[in-house]
Amino acid sequence: MRRLVLFCDESIEKGDFYSNFFGAALVEETQIEYVNGIIRAKLAELNLNNEVKFARITANYQAKYQELMVEFF
């Protein structure tokens, strides 16, 4: 049986619109380790060791964030 995993990131933490999703990624369960490995490797390469938050992006990190998104998509 095919199983899919949906990774979501909520955009609102509390209130009436809690769990409005900002974005999501659908991954085949058999590919989770592979996909996570690619993303972790890119994060390490870019020296992005903390949670990536686009609301806190600075000019110094813009190119790194863009490179991460190219890898992600």
Image (cartoon, helix red, strand yellow):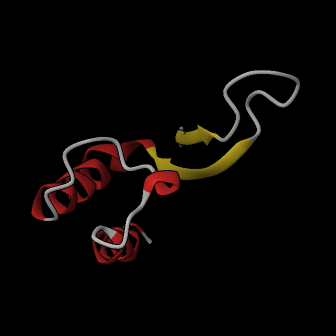
- Residue nearer the viewer, 2 or 73: 73
Q: Residue furthest front?
A: 59
Q: Is residue 28 left or right of residue 70?
A: right
**Residue drawn at (30%, 67%) of the image:** 61
Judge whether 37 appears above or below 67 on screen: above
Q: Residue at x 28, y 70 (%)?
A: 60
Instruction: Point out the image quarter for the N terminus.
Output: top right
Picture quarter containing residue 70?
bottom left
Give the side of residue 47 with respect to residue 26, left or right: left
Q: Residue furthest top?
A: 15
Image coordinates for residue 41, horizontal then vertical, percent: 15, 57
Q: Nearer the viewer, residue 8 or 56?
A: 56
* 23 displayed left or right of 67: right
Q: State the image quarter where residue 12 is shown.
A: top right
Measured as percent of width and height from the top left, residue 66 is found at: 38, 75
Residue toward you, 46 or 8: 46
Above-or-below relation of 61 to 9:
below
Image-quadrant location for residue 38: bottom left
Asked if 43 appears above or below 17 in the picture, the reply is below
**Which quarter of the rendered picture does the C terminus lie within?**
bottom left
Q: Could you say where residue 57 lies in the image, as x and y percent from the top left?
A: 42, 60
Report whether 54 appears left or right of 39. right
Q: Total marks drawn?
A: 0
Instruction: Give the image location of residue 29, x and y in percent.
Output: 43, 41
Q: Residue at x 34, y 42 (%)?
A: 51
